[in-house]
Amino acid sequence: MKQFEEKYLAAVDLGSSKIGLCVAHIQEEAVHIVYYRETPSAGILSSAIYIPMQTAREVRKAVSEAEDELMVKISGVVVGLPRNDIVQVTASALRKRAEPDEYVSEEEIRAIKEEALETYPLSDPEHQAIYGAVAQSFTLEEGMRLTEREIVGTLTPSIEGEFKVFIGRRQAVQAIDKMFRGTGVEVLRKYFLPEVMAKAVLNKEEMKGGVALVDIGAGVTSVAVYRGGVLRYYAAIPFGGRTVTGDIESECSLEDELAEKVKIRFGVCPPERLGPNGDKVLQIRLSEPYREIPVRYISEVITARYREIIEAVLYHIQESGLQNALRGGIVLTGGAAAQSGLEAMLRDISGYSVRKGYPKPLFSSPAGSAVMSPSATAAVGMILAARDEGIPDCAGERRESAEVKEAAPGPEEPQEEPAGPAEETPEPEKANPSPGRSGRRGRRKDVDDPAQGTLDLVWTKVEDVFLKIYDYMNKNEGNNLS
């Protein structure tokens, strides 16, 4: 059985409305989540960092609170990549095997997948970055097409893999690096979130039979369609729960914070599910004369926006071509999935079976019940993925409170004096890891790859599928963050 050393792992979920910080104590394969807390975010729009200085301030505050409570020094974290502005490309890669008389091994397939992630030729590398690459199938030289699990143990002189490559904005990745450099915390790995969230929420039967994982966040709603245990399709819709709050704010003339509280406390969709509360009227006594807002009207505002989100979700399920193959139906997760009545409304409109996605009980949670909410699925998924990938210890003993505060320089960044000595070590290679690859490059050295020394992968682009990345090809775009 695979053994893991005792260590701490920390994950940061950068959301449009909240920053979720999760810390787990790992003992062999056991995961004990000892800390999970959500704090308001700043400088983030549609899950991407736009003002790193503001985001760095909130992340430093969240990390400092965790360190004070746990009495440890958090030195590194894993973090999720933005979910919006992503292009999906289908491509194939051919690789000749050095030892065709040997069985294909799991290590060899893993090495091919990692090489695919590192060598895919981007059309505009200055503005694009690979967020993830998912193997769809592998074809033997004889023409037989097999899944990743089936190809292990076969004999073939060459392997051709078909991949879905997910490409996002490089500037968004640079913003993450820029922000964390101002916090004194190292980014150990960046994850393409649909993959890790599936690990936390979906079961094997759902992923094999077909399921759509719909994550409704504050700024982005994402749709990830799985079939045969593999991610087959991904799309993002650039609005979510915060848009619903904005509708209430403008329609009812309320401040943002109050509109959010009204949505959570009194919001139900559709209005028919209000029951006796449908006749109630809220009295807002913040000014004279006070305002009266019917609860039914609030519900109508919420329902109109969520209906728009649902229609966009169903459109993308249709675009995936797997709309008739979702035996697992739809799994609804994310912070905005807690909206009262949304699960039933989605079931009524779509005709699919719908369940709410909570983190699976794959860990103990001394941190409390908050980590078991749909809002925590991204952070929990990253912890589980980091455990499986052998990410190194993220925390150590806390020395002195003063030292910890000094480790978090202000947003202006000249205080990166340690950068000089670091250049004499392999750190610079790690300082700008390719998104979705951080942590893999070092791991490959430990893999006994029977295909080492073979020809490089030969890529063939098959097709570009749906979505457009806004501002990708705009050569005059706001240049890289400095």
Image: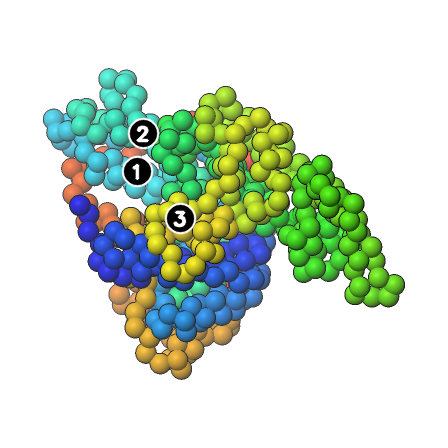
SS for callout 3: helix
**Residue at the location (70% across, 42% down)?**
274
What's the amino acid at mark 2?
Answer: Gly
User: What amino acid does circle 1 point to?
Assistant: Lys
Query: Dots 2 and 3: beta carbons under 8 Å?
Result: no
Horizontal and vertical percent for residue 147?
A: 30, 27
Q: Are marks 2 and 1 in contact (CB under 8 Å)?
A: yes
- Between residues 128 and 240, which one lies in front from this camera angle? 240
Comparing 104 with 69, the one in front is 69
34 to 390, vertically: above or below = below
Q: Which residue is mark 2?
A: 161
Q: CA distance from mark 1 to mark 3?
A: 21 Å
Disc 1 or 3, which lies upstream in sequence?
A: 1
The residue indicated by pointer 1 is: 113
Mark 1 packing: few (<14 Cα in 10 Å), some, or many (20+)?
some
Residue 287: quadrant of the picture? bottom right
Is residue 90 something that shows in the picture?
Answer: no
Mark 2–mark 3 Cα distance, whole angstroms, equals 26 Å
| Residue 394 versus residue 389 in the image, above or below | below
